[in-house]
Image (cartoon, rainbow, N blue to C red):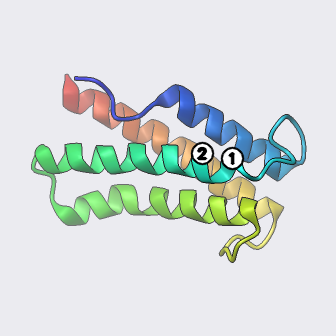
Amino acid sequence: MASVFDMQQIQYALEKFGDFINGSGSGHDVSGWADVGAKIIVEGLRGFEEKLRAHGTRADEIEHDLGPAIYAACQLRSYVTGDKSDIANQNEARVYRGFLGVKIEELYQLEQELDS
C-alpha cells in the first residue's frame, strides 16, 4: 500500500521551517511557504489518521499518536507567519521542529509496519 506521507515534500517543508528559524538558507526570509508546508505535513498526518481508523485503532490511541504532531505543525506555521503562537522564541521553535521531524519519522515507520 502506498504511503500517506509524502516524505520528500515533508522533509523539504521541515528544512524550510529550519531555515526560517535559523535565519539561513533559502527559506529564511520567505514565510509564505509556511501554510503550504504545514498543509503538506497535516495532510499526511490526517491521511495516516484515516489509515489507523481503517485498521481499527482506538480513537484515544490515534489522538495520542497524532495530536501532538498536528499541534506542532500548526504552531510552527503560526510562528513563521507571525501569527499568535505558543512558541515564544527561536529555541522553542527549534524544539517544535525537531519534535515534528522525529514524530513524523516514527509515524512513517509505524505505517510501514501496518502495511507489511
- In the image: residue 34, left or right of residue 27: left
The answer to whether marks 2 and 1 mark residues whose Cβ atoms lie closer than 8 Å is yes
Of residues 77 and 114, the one drawn nearer to the viewer in this rendering: 77
Rendered-image quadrant of the N terminus: top left
* Residue pictured at 63% horizontal, 39% vertical: 13
> Is 26 situated above or below 35?
above
The vertical placement of 21 against 26, above or below, is below
For mark 2, does the 10 Å Cα neighbourhood hold few (<14), some (14 to 19), or many (20 or more) residues?
A: many
Q: Position of residue 19 (x, y in %)?
A: 80, 42
- Across and down, in percent, residue 72 comes to 55, 60
Residue 107 appears left or right of 55: right
Assign the C terminus to one quadrant of the image: top left
Q: How many marks?
A: 2
As helix, strand or loop, the secondary structure at mark 1 comes to helix
Q: Which mark is residue 17?
A: none
53 over 24 or under it: above or below? below
For disc 2, the marked residue is 37
State the image quarter where residue 74 is shown.
bottom right
- Residue count near mark 1 (Cα–Cα under 10 Å), binned few <14, some 14–19, many ≥20: some
Circle 2: residue type: Gly
Q: Residue at x 71, y 72 (%)?
A: 83
Quadrant hosting residue 59 = bottom left
Q: How far across and down, in percent of the image, does residue 11 sit?
A: 59, 33
Q: Secondary structure at mark 2?
A: helix
Amino acid on which the number 1 mark rests in the picture: Trp
Q: Is residue 30 left or right of residue 16?
A: right
Q: Nearer the viewer, residue 72 or 99?
A: 72
Q: Residue at label 1?
A: 33
Give the residue displayed 15% in from the left and 52% down from the top. Answer: 57
Q: Is residue 103 left or right of residue 26?
A: left
* Position in image of residue 28 (x %, y %): 85, 45
